């Protein structure tokens, strides 16, 4: 009992790996007691298989993260430097953005039918509607004429088949 009492919260301890399970590793702490390192506290990177990181008999340093009713929880990853911090001190900030450059102005949008219609700009909704109907009817009649010719049908051809 006196052995686990000497372990204090947030202190770094050293010990040997005495057992490995799917969920973590047991550490025999130098100076007495046993603690457990959960698989999520083994490394700064994702740990799929704890055996890739620890072997029985390895000597490790770990931080005491909880000590409750004789159970000691340890963290190896909290004793390791975070990967992001060591890189950021050597390199400039990675989120530097290039200055905004607006797109070049459009000088010629092209010749569209709606542009010519805007130059005559009708004064009322009724005028706009009548102009729309007129252009729509013209386009429909053009389509009907073109559709009949493209299929190869003619009144003479259809009547001769009878």
Image (cartoon, helix red, strand yellow):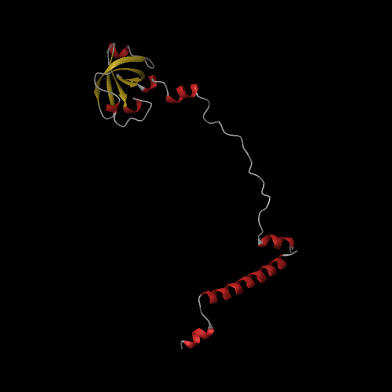
Identify whether 1 is placed above or below 156: above
**Residue drawn at (66%, 69%) of the image:** 135
Residue toward you, 72 or 124: 124
Q: Residue furthest right?
A: 123
Whole-percent x, y for residue 63 in the image: 36, 18
Residue 54 placement: quadrant: top left
Pick whichever, 118 or 72, lies toward us. 118
State the quadrant of the N terminus. Answer: top left
The quarter holding residue 30 reads: top left
Residue in the foreground of this view, choosing between 142 and 64: 142
Q: Is residue 117 shown above or below 38?
A: below
Q: Is residue 12 above or below residue 37?
A: above
Does residue 127 appear in the picture of this structure?
yes
Mark count: 0
Q: Residue 31 location in percent, x, y?
A: 29, 11
* Left or right, residue 154 beside residue 13: right
Residue at screen point 67% across, 61% down: 114
Q: Residue at x 74, y 61 (%)?
A: 119
- Judged left or right of residue 12, residue 154 is right
- Spot occupied by residue 22 in the image (x, y as percentages of width and height): 26, 30
Q: Is residue 69 visible?
A: no
Horizontal side, residue 140 vs residue 89: left or right: right
On the rendered structure, is 119 left or right of 58? right
Residue occupying the point 70% across, 66% down: 128
- Rendering quarter of residue 28: top left
* Image position, residue 140 (x, y; %): 60, 72
């Amino acid at each position: 009992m006196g052995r686990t009492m000497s372990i204090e919260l947030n202190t770094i301890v050293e010990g040997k790996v005495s057992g490995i399970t799917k969920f973590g590793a047991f550490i025999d702490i130098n100076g007495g007691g046993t603690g457990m390192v959960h698989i999520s506290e083994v490394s700064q990177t994702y740990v799929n298989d704890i055996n890739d990181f620890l072997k029985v008999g390895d000597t490790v340093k770990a931080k005491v993260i909880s000590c409750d009713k004789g159970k000691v929880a340890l963290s190896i990853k909290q004793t390791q430097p975070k990967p992001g911090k060591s890189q950021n001190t050597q390199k400039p900030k990675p989120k530097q953005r290039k200055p905004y450059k607006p797109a070049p102005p459009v000088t010629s949008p092209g010749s569209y039918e709606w542009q010519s219609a805007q130059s005559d700009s009708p004064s009322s909704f009724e005028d706009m509607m009548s102009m729309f109907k007129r252009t729509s009817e013209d386009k429909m009649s053009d389509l009907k004429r073109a559709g009949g010719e493209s299929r190869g049908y003619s009144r003479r051809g259809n009547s001769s088949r009878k």
